[in-house]
Image: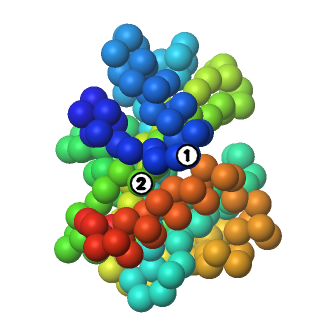
Amino acid sequence: MQVVSRFDPGDDGLAAKSKDLLCLLLQHGMRPFSARQFWHGHVTCTALIFHPKEHRTLMIHHHRLRQWLLPGGHVEKSDKSLDAAAAREAEEETHVKIDHRHTPFLAGIDVHGIPPRQHEPYHLHHDLVWCFRAASDRCEATTEAPKLMWAREKDWEKLELTPSIRRSIGRASARIAAGGKRG
């Protein structure tokens, strides 16, 4: 709860709304980290991973949602922390290696709807976007992420990145440029 309450969305109204919704979920949700809690949704973690040398971000084409997103997913009981959940998901989906010399930081909060499928109703993901740096540019497609790329800002329109992803990348870039904790 402290990590979320300390997050400063600045003038990003969507991130402020998402922060408020996530705080309410954490305060009042029965099992906010359970992937089986659909009413009110559940917490997920996403990895915003910067290329080790260039200003590019690792993007995946999500196998089910059929859109370009950051890698990420559900929190598991074995995850030692929320940023560890994001790193694990990214490594599973893309085989990217995270550079652990850089301390991850919360770069965004986004609450968004997930369409129904099989035995899951429509529900919300209260997503924490964690910033990392890759140890190398090596990564590979998987069944969960059949296409991936290191995207530059000029690629964002073509990839149809959501405003929340664009703002999270911008927020993380500004923090790194200002000399804050590096991702």
Residue beneath label 1, please? 12
Q: Using the rendered image of the protein, determine whether residue 177 is visible from the camera's viewpoint.
A: yes
Which of 93/122 is in front? Answer: 122
Query: In the current view of this chain or complex, which residue is farthest to the front?
Result: 11
In this rendering, is residue 118 above or below 170?
Answer: above
Q: Residue at x 20, y 44 (%)?
A: 80
Which mark sits nearer the N-terminus, 1 or 2? 1
What amino acid does circle 2 point to?
Answer: Ala
User: On the image, which quarter does residue 180 sit in?
Assistant: bottom left
Q: Residue at x 34, y 15 (%)?
A: 27
Q: Position of residue 116 (x, y in %)?
A: 71, 26
Residue beneath label 2, please? 107
Q: Position of residue 119 (x, y in %)?
A: 64, 21
Q: Is residue 122 left or right of residue 99?
A: right
Which of 147/152 is in front? Answer: 152
Which of 15/148 is in front? Answer: 15
What amino acid does circle 1 point to?
Answer: Asp
Q: Secondary structure at mark 2?
A: strand
Quadrant containing the N terminus in the rendered view: top left
Tell me if mark 2 has few (under 14), some (14-19) or many (20+) residues whose alpha carbon lies within 10 angstroms of its own.
many
Q: Is residue 146 left or right of residue 58?
A: right
In this rendering, is residue 101 above or below 110?
Answer: below
Quadrant containing the C terminus in the rendered view: bottom left
Q: CA distance from mark 1 to mark 2?
A: 12 Å
Q: Position of residue 112 (x, y in %)?
A: 62, 35
